[in-house]
Image (spheres, rainbow, N blue to C red):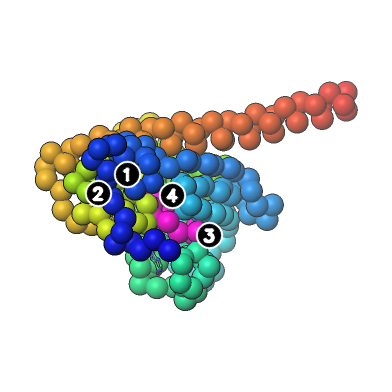
Amino acid sequence: MVKKTDIQLFDEEKGVRHDGRRPEDMRPVRMEVGVLDNAQGSALVEFGKTRILAAVYGPREILPKHMTLPGRAILRIRYHMAPFSTTERKNPAPSRREIELSKVIREALEASVFTRLYPRTTIDVFIEVLQADGGTRTAGITAASLALADAGIPMRDLIAGVAVGKVGGRIVVDVDEVEDSMGEADMPVAMMPGLGKIVLLQLNGSLSRDEFKQAMSMAIDAINKIYEMQKSVLKEKFTAYSEAGKNKQQQHS
Ligand code: ADP
């Protein structure tokens, strides 16, 4: 077994990272919507080995009732890592990290959802990390936003996210777990790309002003690519729906 300490984070000669990616390369990204029959909206998102399932229920009645807000819907987010998602079994009870991430993700998603359209209701979003290999909060937001769109919840824009970082002295895109744990800095970013608005920005470690600028610009490039994938996967599903609807109508006429 390769020990983490044996891993060379950046190969200067070849200009590649420990897994062969160039600094600006994301891992293979895969997305699918409508993967669950029993949720109003759902999405599966993969960034390499990081695999996240998001499910949306609502707008629906709030229980307990005292959480109701007269002027708008509330968003309830549960970010959770499955016990089998990490190399060592994770305790299924919500950890401090998961509670904090649920809050950070809620604040990001609240920027996009038109909550005032659904007073006195809740929109519940479950983000289940099936497999964790770095960047789960940004992949989680990307999946949650797709699931909200799949549920038909009106939004200002989709949200897409990626974690950039500094690894072996280089600024790199889509940090995996090895790079996250051994690198110098990790910076998750999420945006409403169509509106050019940042909804999540965190930094673990430190970056100089120039490194920060480079990291942001690389994050924005990657986020724009993720955004295009999100739009195309949604278009594909809803085009298939409308085609099926048309065929049905023709059969009946
Ligand atoms: P993010 O997943 O958004 O990058 P962190 O930086 O906190 O969030 O975590 C980085 C990575 O560390 C995770 O993606 C996961 O692979 C790993 N990790 C986090 N928490 C645990 C845990 N409790 N047990 C094992 N691995 C974990």
CA–CA distance in space, label 4 to label 2: 20 Å
Residue 122 at x, y percent in the picture: 51, 58
CA–CA distance in space, label 3 to label 4: 12 Å
Q: Is residue 28 magenta?
A: no
Say which residue appears at 57% left-offset and 35% top-offset.
234
Q: Mark 4 or mark 2, which has the lower sequence index?
A: 4
Is residue 155 rendered to the left or right of residue 233? left
Residue type at tag 4: Ala
Q: Mark 3 or mark 2, which has the lower sequence index?
A: 3
Is residue 241 rendered to the left or right of residue 24? right
Q: Is residue 133 magenta?
A: yes
Q: Is residue 219 visible?
A: no
* Residue at which label 3 appears: 130
* Residue at which label 1 appears: 17
Q: Nearer the viewer, mark 1 or mark 3?
A: 1
Please state the extent of the stretch shown in magenta in the rendering.
Answer: 127-138
Mark 1 touching mark 2, by CB under 8 A?
A: yes
Say which residue appears at 48% left-offset and 41% top-offset.
29
CA–CA distance in space, label 1 to label 3: 25 Å
